[in-house]
Image (cartoon, helix red, strand yellow):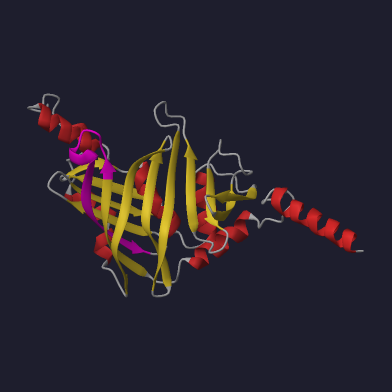
Amino acid sequence: MKDTLRYVAIVLLCLTLFLPTLPAGAYVLKSGHILQLMAASLGKSKHLSIHQRLVVFDPLAENGKVILPETVHYSFPSKFRSDINAETIHRIHIADRRTALTVIDRRITSETGNRFDRYKDLLLLRSRSLLEQWLGDMGIDTGISSLGRFNETLALIIGAQYPDESVSQLWVDKATFRPLRWIVKTEEPLVREFEIRYLQWQAIGADWYPWKVEFYENQMLVRQITVEQVAAEKTIAREMFDIAALKQQFAGTNDSQVPEDDTPVNEVQDTIDSFKKRFE
């Protein structure tokens, strides 16, 4: 009898050690349910104001990086504004649902924003329906969900069957239902994969916000946001998010109207202009 029990114990130990930690047959929540729980996990504040530092890794810069102060405002579930005021660049970016505007040094440079601005979407769209629509627009297949592991964190994956990372997908922390990774596959020749990681989540009253956001191109860290202060606000002036007013204020200043002979006067200016283009 003792030998039998010993044999059973050994078998159970072997099964525990050698069977996959993520069995293929394990039940996984559907994407809609995951998104509903994710939206609820972020909180219920109407507005947030955030002070943060944006680090741009640049081998040509001193110490290999440029650090910029940035102020961000959210008005849930659709309005967002970012302001960067630094010696090298002054940038305003406003987004409201499917419309956006970017102004750099008093010049309209974009009416869509760039892929780095997209990190805010997962934090801003606090409803299942908005998130499902957003996933579809981003080319993520909501008909697929699976269970995976990122470092030591178990995650629910929307858009791919773990461990497949060949398609665009969203990773959500299984324990907290907060966003963890967003992987974007592109057809660009230079940047075939773009990834955003949402890290170091902290509670702000009844809300949660990531105090570190990392951006990767082809698995190389190229930018990082480090939050310094987050405050829940009772209200934020609507004028802060008025895209039409901002567009009117800077009408006639878009890049297409820059004279063809308006070339950089020296290599320093050329470097500054090249740096600014990364934010358009």
Observer able to see residue 193? yes
Secondary structure mainly formed by the magenta segment: strand
The quadrant in which residue 34 appears is: bottom right
- Is residue 66 magenta-colored? yes
- Is residue 67 magenta-colored? yes
Q: Which residue lies furthest to the left in this view?
A: 265
**On-image quarter of the C terminus:** top left
The quadrant in which residue 153 appears is: bottom right
Residue 223, percent from left and from top: 32, 44
Residue at horizontal 56 percent and vertical 59 percent from the top: 35
The answer to whether 127 appears left or right of 8 in the picture is left
The answer to whether 3 appears left or right of 122 in the picture is right
Q: Is residue 74 above or below residue 115?
A: below
Q: How many labels does the image show?
A: 0
Q: In this view, does 118 lie above or below 128?
A: above
Residue 212, percent from left and from top: 36, 55
Residues in magenta?
Answer: 56-75
